[in-house]
Image (cartoon, grey):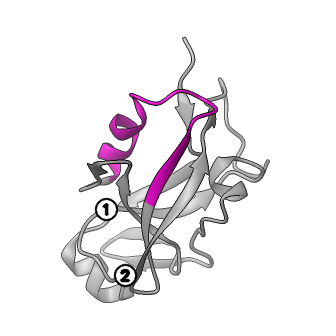
Amino acid sequence: MRYAYLGVSTTAVYPQLADRFKLGTENGAWIQEIVKGGPADAADLQAGSGETRFQARQARPGGDVIDRIGDTKIESENDLGLALTPYEPGEEIDVEIVRDGERKTVKVKLGERPAQVDPQG
């Protein structure tokens, strides 16, 4: 079985986190890491950088928040995998993000999820 792959590691957005890091949206999947050479990297999506702690969790400020995949609203990081389910590797999809408080739509050509992922590429 082949699965569509975006190549990101995310954390859930909730109101306090959104306020603290000025994300511009109160829900979604906040990109913390991007797999080098993966689909998100090729589409110029942005991950956070550095590290800070907030409410006993590590966070990397500055990354994009994924708000929508195609027609599917992303309410939490768990929605991300489900939203990719109907797509095939190689398909180009619209990914709506919030970056620096601004909404934009980015075209992403999905890859095939590898058996193991090394975030460093």
**Residue bearing the label numbered 1:** 28
Spatial CA distance of label 1 from label 2 is: 10 Å
Q: Which residue appears at 33% of the width and 35% of the height?
A: 82
| Mark seen at residue 55 | none
Amino acid bearing label 1 = Gly
Q: Is residue 88 above or below residue 105?
A: above
Query: On the rendered structure, is 45 left or right of 84?
Result: right
Q: Secondary structure at mark 2?
A: loop
Q: Is residue 50 above or below residue 96?
A: below
Task: Tell me residue 41's x, y (percent).
Answer: 69, 57
The residue indicated by pointer 2 is: 23
Q: Is residue 113 magenta?
A: no
Amino acid type at circle 2 is Leu
Q: Is residue 98 above or below residue 79?
A: below
Judge whether residue 83 is colored magenta.
yes
Q: Is residue 84 left or right of residue 4?
A: left
Mark 1 residue element? loop
Q: Earlier in the sequence, mark 1 or mark 2?
A: 2
In the image, the segment drawn in magenta is: 77-95
Asked where in the image residue 79 lies, by quadrant, the reply is: top left
Q: Residue at x 47, y 53 (%)?
A: 94
Residue 78 in picture, x, y percent from top left: 31, 44
- The crowding category of the residue bearing disc 1, from other C-alpha atoms within 10 Å (few below 14, some 14 to 19, many at least 20), is many
